[in-house]
Image (cartoon, rainbow, N blue to C red):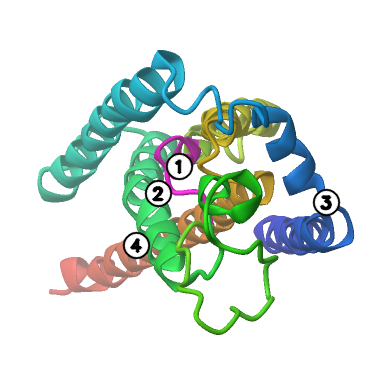
């Protein structure tokens, strides 16, 4: 019952946040306002586009570090699947598996959705010295305009999967789990924000990536919990059924 109630609350939060992001993208020009602040009209460039912090550290070095961390979770999860760590608790095993699956699925799903997107990156737009028109989400691509494949934000996904680390503390320490999820979400959004300063994405691009990451983590965690429950049920049934057989004469 607790899990069912939690699932409904998570679904409601995801629905409300999706509607909020849609409203931000259509009702106000928050994307353009923030991109205008990052763009130097006099020079006709995004000053942070080739800055070391944004181009080298955030986009290359940090991504490699996060990829190595993701690989570590994946290796641990695979190792435990083949040769289970007997000392691991259920919460640790669930946390490792959720993190490993999120490390693979969150960037993969976001990358796939980018390929279906018509939105262009800010630095490609006419407004910022490019050649493409500005399109909001759900707007039709103009005739002769190639799809931009820029939304949701791909680079932010290299950090946003870390929201899954909260699974180590859920549900036995919910406040800590929510705190960890919040910190990781802010970290991922910061990675995306630096890309916004470069002119690589709009705010809503990063917000949609964050939303997708949270939705994927909820789905992955729920799937693992159900799998654990089925495994326990099978173990209980096997142990129960073995008792009569062992006592027969």
Q: Which residue is mark 2?
A: 102
Q: Residue furthest front?
A: 42
Q: Residues within 10 Å of mark 2 (few under 14, many from 20)?
A: many
In this view, the residue in front, 26 or 159, is 26
Instruction: Judge left or right: residue 98 versus residue 244.
Output: right
Q: Nearer the viewer, mark 4 or mark 3?
A: 3
Q: Mark 3 vs mark 1: which is more N-terminal? A: 3
Per the model, the C-alpha gap separating discs 1 and 4 is 26 Å
**What residue is shown at x 83% (from left), y 51% (from top)?**
29
Residue stretch rendered in magenta on the structure: 152-162
* Residue 221 percent location from the top left of the image: 49, 53
Q: Quadrant of residue 203?
A: top right
Q: Mark 4 vs mark 2: which is more N-terminal? A: 2
Residue 197: mark: none
Q: Secondary structure at mark 4?
A: helix
Q: Is residue 100 above or below residue 227?
A: above
Residue 231: mark: 4
Q: Look at the image and say whether residue 154 sits in the magenta stretch.
A: yes
In this view, the residue in front, 226 or 188, is 188
Q: Mark 4 vs mark 3: which is more N-terminal? A: 3
* Residues at discs 2 and 3 in contact (Cβ within 8 Å): no
* Residue 183 percent location from the top left of the image: 62, 25
Q: Is residue 59 visible?
A: yes
Q: Mark 2 vs mark 1: which is more N-terminal? A: 2
Q: Which residue is mark 3?
A: 29
């Amino acid at each position: 019952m607790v899990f069912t109630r939690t699932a409904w609350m998570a679904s409601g939060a995801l629905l409300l946040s999706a509607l909020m992001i849609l409203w931000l993208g259509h009702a106000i020009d928050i994307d353009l306002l923030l991109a205008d602040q990052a763009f130097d009209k006099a020079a006709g460039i995004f000053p942070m586009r080739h800055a070391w912090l944004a181009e080298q550290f955030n986009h290359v070095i940090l991504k490699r570090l996060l990829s190595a961390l993701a690989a570590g979770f994946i290796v641990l999860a695979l190792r435990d699947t083949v040769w289970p760590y007997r000392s691991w608790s259920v919460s640790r095993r669930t946390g490792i598996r959720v993190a490993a699956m999120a490390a693979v699925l969150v960037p993969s799903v976001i990358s796939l959705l980018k390929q279906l997107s018509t939105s262009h990156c800010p630095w490609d737009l006419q407004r910022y010295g490019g050649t493409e028109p500005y399109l909001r989400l759900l707007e039709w691509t103009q005739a002769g305009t190639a799809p931009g494949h820029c939304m949701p934000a791909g680079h932010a996904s290299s950090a946003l999967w870390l929201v899954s680390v909260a699974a180590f503390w859920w549900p036995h320490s919910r406040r800590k789990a929510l705190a960890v999820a919040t910190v990781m979400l802010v970290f991922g959004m910061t990675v995306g924000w630096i890309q916004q300063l470069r002119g690589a994405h709009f705010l809503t691009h990063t917000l949609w990536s964050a939303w997708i990451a949270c939705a994927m983590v909820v789905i992955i965690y729920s799937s693992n919990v159900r799998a654990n429950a089925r495994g326990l049920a099978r173990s209980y049934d096997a142990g129960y059924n073995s008792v009569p057989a062992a006592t027969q004469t």
